[in-house]
Amino acid sequence: MALKRTKIVDIFSPELIGEQVCVKGWVRTRRGNKHVQFVALNDGSTIKNLQIVIDLEKFGEDELKPITTGSSLHVEGTLVASQGKGQTVEVQAQSIEIYGTADPDEYPLQKKGHTLEFLREKAHLRMRTNTFGAVFRIRHHLAFAIHKFFNDKGFFYMHTPLITASDCEGAGDMFQVTTLNLGDLPKNEDGSNDYTKDFFGKPTSLTVSGQLEGELGATSLGAIYTFGPTFRAENSNTPRHLAEFWMIEPEVAFNDITDNMDLAEEFIKYCVQYALDHCKDDIEFLNQMYDNTLIDRLQGVLKQEFVRLSYTEGIKILEESGKKFEFPVKWGVDLQSEHERYLVEQHFKRPVILTDYPREIKAFYMKQNDDGKTVRAMDVLFPQIGEIIGGSEREENYDKLISEIERRGIPMKDMWWYLETRKFGTVPHAGFGLGFERLILFVTGMANIRDVIPFPRTPNNAEF
Ligand code: ATP
Ligand code: MN
């Protein structure tokens, strides 16, 4: 009977020593001498490589020739305790089957030490490197942690549509969705496009957020969260923006802004703790390779309570800091990440939740404060990242919401279904959006958001 394959992540257990094992994976390196060859094999299940020891008395030179970096193998042999440095066990090969070769003159990852920029051009292969293996294993565990956190709290996972006919959020430009022939658009008499001929009979786009539909869920099921892709055609070429990114949006009936802040803080801390508990090897690798303050930073966030501060107080601190910012600060401006990071990294030295922003720089649905100038918004600001969460208590008063929609000139007829939540059994409620890739940036310590999603979508980049 054929020997069952053992994943490399499972092979380091002492009970297996002395056993016959079958392993499969890709060759990371091969070295050795005339008597013995050592192959480092990796199968993606862990950052650890398994050492395969090949006795040249048992295998011919020619047979081994195709075993180069990047080739793929099926190896059977005995698992033994290793005398070598850097590993606890190794496999003494008895049989080797080569699945596929990787010509050293062509294989892009033949050499070690490529830059992250180079690897971005090789996104189809970069998951085979230590760095990206670590990042994408962590990404998986964080996704799982998010579902676990909300499920354990009794939230319902809600799927909101990706194609939407409302463009009222105003969160950056939207990607249009159409089946019309762009080279020959049907026209109305006044020359505008005739969208009645389009697939949905009206203009549609990819969603920038699931929140509005999420509110419908929260005001029915009590507490929901969404976790899905969102799309923003904002032409911002920054290390923190993608055109396609994943967002988690909890929305909870009967929560006010304080409950919302409590939830956000508990949620992020849970995710960070989960990653430390379940991704130890990968985080240690990243800590050692890129940023030896990473683990301290993660533990720091767990230990400290987040500062809670109003926007107005935050602006005062920035104005009195005496620091020259690229974008000058005064009450009313939208904060740039340099301002957010000053508050977090220099002033408070811990995460900050900034609340009660000027009404004019926030969305129409946020609950209006009595001062008439600010709304009950909350942004969570993080070291290295800046804004990681944006949220608010929602305006539940029908008349106030209508007058704000009118004041902003948002097309009301598209909003009728949303307004009915305030018309029939309206309740206080609150929610927020966490950018999944920004969380992964924080947990991995990577500097560019393009390096924490397998196939990034950014301006002029949709190759893979
Ligand atoms: P920013 O000011 O950084 O552009 P935003 O105010 O547009 O963020 P929101 O609309 O509040 O962000 O979205 C909620 C969260 O989604 C943000 O806190 C952030 O974590 C994430 N996010 C927003 N835009 C992007 C993007 N283009 N790429 C990746 N994540 C994003
Ligand atoms: Mn934005």
Image (cartoon, rainbow, N blue to C red):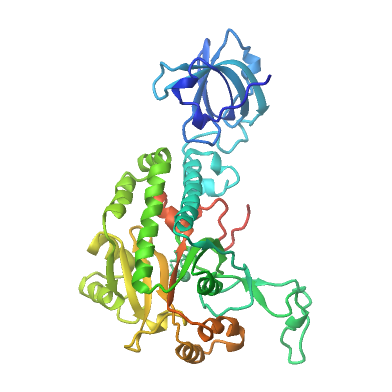
Q: Is residue 301 above or below residue 348?
A: above
**Left or right position of 419 against 289:** right
Q: x%, y% of residue 399?
A: 47, 91
Observer able to see residue 243? yes
Picture residue at 31% right of the left edge, 51% below the top: 297
Q: Is residue 430 above or below residue 240?
A: below
Picture residue at 52% right of the left edge, 62% below the top: 156
Residue 343, quarter of the rendered image: bottom left
Extreme residue toward the top, this view: 57
Q: In this view of the protein, which residue sits in the foreground, 369 or 127?
A: 369
Give the quadrant of the N terminus: top right
**Left or right position of 293 against 412:** left
Q: x%, y% of residue 108?
A: 58, 38
Q: In this view of the protein, which residue sits in the foreground, 159 or 286?
A: 159
Residue 102, quarter of the rendered image: top right
Please state the total of marks drawn on the protein image.
0
Picture residue at 36% right of the left edge, 59% below the top: 266
Q: In this view of the protein, which residue sits in the foreground, 299 or 462?
A: 299
Q: Is residue 378 above or below residue 104?
A: below
Q: Is residue 49 above or below residue 454?
A: above
Q: x%, y% of residue 389?
A: 41, 65
Observer able to see residue 336? no
Q: x%, y% of residue 180?
A: 76, 74
